[in-house]
């Protein structure tokens, strides 16, 4: 009896555990973001939902992000510019971050900033961060670390997410000292996203329907997938990358198969000679070109008139001759018999 009772208790316990909701790594973070750790959790949950590994924090990125959040809260200005006029890149290098990428273009680093009245309610990516560049800050496979900062001033909250890539050696690049004394060209610190990335230009499908893309500076699997209307997973599968999400400049990736080539416009045919016949409208004073058939009439022709005149003259002569004979006869008769 005790055996059956124990089995019943175990089954009931298993049943109750099955009803308890399971916690998943991609679960939505807390709605109200009030700390840097919550903001990092939100970004890494977003990455997991796209099949990307979460980014580990870096103490220097935590410092740059928090100092920028505090600076914006103190000035009330939402900006990528740092105190003293230094750039994000210069701040990273001055703090000893071994920044990868072309430092003359700002290096591989990116920053999202945001200000809200009241705490940020994260029930999805904030509207201001949903464009491709802001999403690339959070989803790029080129970045190796993350940092975040949250600061408050009155009822306003200021949020910063910093991501960057370290060099493979973990050491500063040789050109780092030069960057500290100059403003990196091409790095737009005043734009909506503090990063430099060559825009993705779509490649033309090849005759077999495949589309290859050559990776340019700052581009990532995320930005390439968005541009071609595909997914990171699909590009990884087509190129045998597995879970590897980092791409490098100059790498050629197969991004699509069975693509349809754009319709080619037919070549223009330029005739060597072309006669343009333009009809000329007829006016009242211009004759038409339609021949007019002669209409028979009762009037005689000139030849007929001549013949008729000749015949009439002959008849008149004959009449006059006869009249002359008659007149002569009457005269003789009168002379022969005057008394009668």
Image: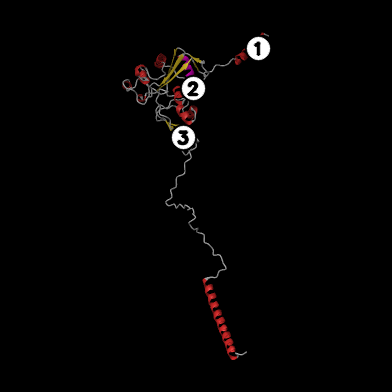
Where on the picture, by quarter, is residue 221? top left
Residue 65 within the segment the image draws in magenta: no
Residue pictured at 67% horizontal, 11% vertical: 4
Q: Report helix, strand or loop for mark 1.
A: helix
Q: Earlier in the sequence, mark 3 or mark 2?
A: 2
Provide the residue designation for mark 3. Answer: 211
**x and y percentages locating residue 54 in the rendered image:** 47, 20
Label 1 Cα neighbours within 10 Å, binned few <14 / some 14-19 / many ≥20: few
Provide the residue designation for mark 1. Answer: 8
Q: Report helix, strand or loop for mark 3.
A: strand
Whether tag 1 and tag 3 are in contact, CB under 8 A, the answer is no
Left or right for 88, reference 229: left
Provide the residue designation for mark 2. Answer: 127
Q: Is 12 located above or below residue 53 in the figure?
A: above
Q: Earlier in the sequence, mark 1 or mark 2?
A: 1
Residue sitting farthest toward the bottom = 336
């Amino acid at each position: 009896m005790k055996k059956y009772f124990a089995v019943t208790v175990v089954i009931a316990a298993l049943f109750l555990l099955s009803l308890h909701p399971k916690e998943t790594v991609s679960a939505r973070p807390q709605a109200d973001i009030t700390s840097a750790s919550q903001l990092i959790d939100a970004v890494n949950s977003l990455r997991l939902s796209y099949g990307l590994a979460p980014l580990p924090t870096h103490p220097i990125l935590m410092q740059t992000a928090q100092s920028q959040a505090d600076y914006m809260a103190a000035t009330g200005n939402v900006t990528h510019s740092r105190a003293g006029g230094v750039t994000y890149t210069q701040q990273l290098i001055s703090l000893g971050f071994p920044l990868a990428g072309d430092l003359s273009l700002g290096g591989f680093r990116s920053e999202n900033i945001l200000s809200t009245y009241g705490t940020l309610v994260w029930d999805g990516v904030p509207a201001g961060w949903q464009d491709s560049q802001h999403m690339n800050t959070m989803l790029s496979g080129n970045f190796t670390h993350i940092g975040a900062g949250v600061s408050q001033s009155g009822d306003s909250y200021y949020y910063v997410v910093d991501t960057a890539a370290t060099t493979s050696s973990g050491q500063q690049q040789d050109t780092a000292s030069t960057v500290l004394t100059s403003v990196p060209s091409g790095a737009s610190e005043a734009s909506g996203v503090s990063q430099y990335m060559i825009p993705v230009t779509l490649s033309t499908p090849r005759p077999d329907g495949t589309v290859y893309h050559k990776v340019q500076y700052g581009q990532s699997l995320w930005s390439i997938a968005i541009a071609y209307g595909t997914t990171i997973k699909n590009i990884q599968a087509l190129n045998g990358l597995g879970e590897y999400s980092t791409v490098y400049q100059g790498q050629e990736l197969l991004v699509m198969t069975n693509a349809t080539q754009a319709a080619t416009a037919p070549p223009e045919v330029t005739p060597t000679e072309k006669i343009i016949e333009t009809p000329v409208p007829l006016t009242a004073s211009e004759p038409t070109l339609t021949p007019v058939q002669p209409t028979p009439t009762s009037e005689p022709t000139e030849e007929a008139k001549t013949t008729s005149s000749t015949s009439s003259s002959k008849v008149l002569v004959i009449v006059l001759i006869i009249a002359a004979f008659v007149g002569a006869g009457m005269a003789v008769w009168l002379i022969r018999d005057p008394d009668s």
